[in-house]
Image (cartoon, rainbow, N blue to C red):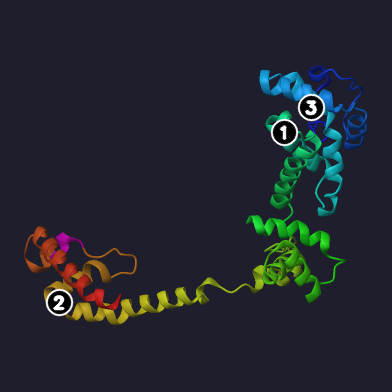
Amino acid sequence: MNASTALLPANKVFDIGFSGSLGNIDAYISAVNRLPMLSHEEEISLATRLRDSNDLAAAQSLVLSHLRLVVSIARGYLGYGLPHADLIQEGNIGLMKAVKRFDPDQGVRLVSYAMHWIKAEMHEYILKNWRLVKVATTKAQRKLFFNLRSHKEGLDSMTPDQVESLAKTLNVKREEVIEMETRLSGRDIALEAPTDDDDDKFAPIAYLSSERNEPTRVLEAQQYDRLQTEGLTTALEKLDPRSRRIVEARWLANDDGSGATLHELADEFGVSAERIRQIEAVALKKMKGTLAAFA
C-alpha cells in the first residue's frame, strides 16, 4: 500500500460516497474536497455523541469532514521538500487526536481546535525527517525553526536588523536566532564519497583527524609507553634474582605470551611447581605495587 492509499480508510468502513481508486495523491485530494462539510449544529451533535457515548461513527464523520483542512495545512509545508502525502498522513493523525479530545461545550469550532494538533504532528514529522541530524530539539528551537524559514527573504543571510526584529518578536536571544540560521544554512554531507573514483579524496572521511592524534589518546599512549619501559624496568629491578628470572621466563620471554611452564622452572630451580607458582604470585603482586606509581 502506498502513502496516498493509506491516507483514507476503505469505502466499506465509512460508506460516505467514495468511488473509484485513490491510488495517487491527486485522487485523494479530489475525493476529500468532495466530502460534505458539517454545520455548527451537526458538529456539536456528533461531538456530544462521541464524548458521551463513545460513538465511533460520530468520530468518523468529524474526521472525514475535516480532511480538507489537513490537505490545506499540508500545502503550506511543501517547501521543506518532504512528500505531500506523508505530510497529509501525519496531519490526519493530528486531526484524529483533536477529535478525540474535542469538547463541544467550550464554544469553539473543531476547525480552530484541530489546527494546533494537525500542525504539531506535521512539525514533528518535518523535524525528524528534514535532516539526518536534528536541527531543533527544544521547544524554543522548534519555534525558531519554523518562524525563521517564513521570515527569511531568499537565500541571503539575515541582516542584523532582521535578526533583532525576529528575536524581539519571538522573545528569544538574538544569538539563538543566529545559531538557528547557521543550522538551516548547512546541509547533510555524506561522510564517505558515494563512488570509488578520485572524488574519495575530497570526502570528509579523507580529512578528518585521526583518533590517534586526539589529546586523550596521545596522553594514554605516552603513559602506556612509560609503563612498558621505565615502569617495567623499575619493577623488575626490585625483585630478587630468582623471582625476576621466573617472571621474565613466564611472561617476558616471547611476544606471543608462550613462556616457560611451571614444571620447566621447577626443574631448573629444583623445587615443586607449586612453589614456583607461589614465588610468581608474590613477585607479580610486588611489581603491581611498583607499577602503580607510573599509572
Looking at the image, tell me whether mark 2 or mark 3 is earlier in sequence order: 3
Judging by the rendered image, the residue that carries numbered circle 2 is 239
Residues at marks 1 and 2, CA–CA distance in whole angstroms: 88 Å
Is residue 85 shown left or right of residue 261? right
Viewer-proximal residue among 180 and 266: 180
Q: Which residue, given by chain and number where applicable, does mark 1 sit on?
A: 106
Apparent side of residue 269 relative to residue 130 in the rendered image (left or right): left
The answer to which of marks 1 and 2 sits earlier in the sequence is 1
Q: In this rendering, would 176 be left or right of 165?
A: left
- Name the residue carrying label 3: 62
Please name the amino acid that badge 2 sits on.
Answer: Leu
Residue 220 position within the rendered picture, expressed as x and y whole percent measured from the top left: 41, 74
The quadrant of the rendering that contains the N terminus is top right
Q: Looking at the picture, how far across and down is residue 45, in whole percent?
A: 78, 21
Main secondary structure of the magenta stretch: helix
Q: Earlier in the sequence, mark 1 or mark 3?
A: 3
Residue in the picture at 87% in, 27% down = 39
Circles 1 and 2: CB atoms closer than 8 Å: no
Image position, residue 145 (x, y; %) = 73, 59
Q: Is 262 one of the magenta-colored residues?
A: yes
Question: Residue, x 21% and y 76% (percent of image)?
Answer: 290
Residue 146: image quadrant is bottom right
